């Protein structure tokens, strides 16, 4: 039996909730289910609380970083990539044909 203690801070009353939690048994030859031990309950509770803290911290971090991400995105949209017209036109070749094209400007395409 697992006992949870819940505090109602406004009235300073404590409520006890008694419930029995069953989990898959380690040794299924005896029983399919076994009662959750107090130690396992504590571990599950701490893992759950840790996950909640991590999710909250992640949400806060994302909210804090959102303006910077939007600013970076807007700056990236302003960048325009164009081909340099002062250089000679690139010739399109496949990878297998590049041995003879050393020193030339090439545009490389696919397979061997």
Image (spheres, rainbow, N blue to C red):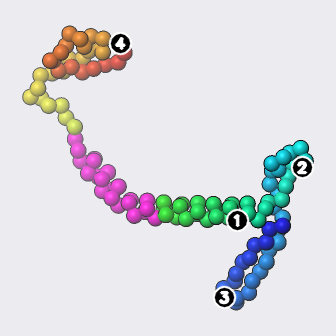
| Label 3 vs 1, first from the N-terminus | 3
| Label 4 vs 3, first from the N-terminus | 3
Calculate the distance from the C-alpha at mark 2 to the C-alpha at mark 4. 62 Å
Q: Secondary structure at mark 4?
A: loop
| Label 2 vs 4, first from the N-terminus | 2
Q: Report the residue marked by disc 2.
A: 31
Q: Quadrant of residue 9?
A: bottom right
| Label 2 vs 3, first from the N-terminus | 3
Percent position of residue 62, x then y: 43, 59
Q: Report the residue marked by disc 1.
A: 42
The magenta span reads 60-80
Q: Secondary structure at mark 2?
A: loop
- Is 57 rendered above or below residue 93? below
Calculate the distance from the C-alpha at mark 4 to the C-alpha at mark 3. 76 Å
Q: Are marks 1 and 4 in contact (CB under 8 Å)?
A: no
Quadrant for the C terminus, please.
Answer: top left
Kindly identify the residue that appears in the image at 17 percent across and 20 percent down: 105
Kindly identify the residue that appears in the image at 12 percent across and 29 percent down: 85
Kindly identify the residue that appears in the image at 79 percent across and 72 percent down: 3
Percent position of residue 58, x then y: 48, 60
Camera-near label (3 vs 1) is 1
Residue in front for this viewpoint, 24 or 72? 24
Calculate the distance from the C-alpha at mark 1 to the C-alpha at mark 4. 60 Å
Of the numbered discs in the image, which one, if any, rests on residue 10?
3
Calculate the distance from the C-alpha at mark 2 to the C-alpha at mark 1. 23 Å
Q: Main secondary structure of the magenta part?
A: helix
Q: Report the residue marked by disc 4.
A: 112
User: How many other residues sit within 10 Å of disc 4, few (<14), some (14-19) or many (≥20)?
Assistant: few
């Amino acid at each position: 039996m697992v006992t949870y203690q819940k505090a109602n801070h406004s009235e300073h009353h404590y409520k006890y909730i008694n419930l029995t939690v069953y989990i898959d048994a380690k040794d299924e030859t005896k029983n399919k289910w076994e009662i959750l031990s107090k130690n396992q309950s504590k571990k599950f509770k701490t893992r759950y609380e840790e996950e909640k803290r991590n999710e909250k911290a992640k949400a806060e971090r994302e909210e804090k970083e959102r303006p910077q991400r939007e600013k970076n995105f807007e700056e990236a949209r302003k960048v325009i990539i164009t081909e340099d017209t002062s250089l000679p036109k690139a010739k399109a070749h496949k990878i297998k044909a590049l041995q003879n094209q050393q020193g030339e400007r090439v545009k490389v395409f696919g397979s061997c």
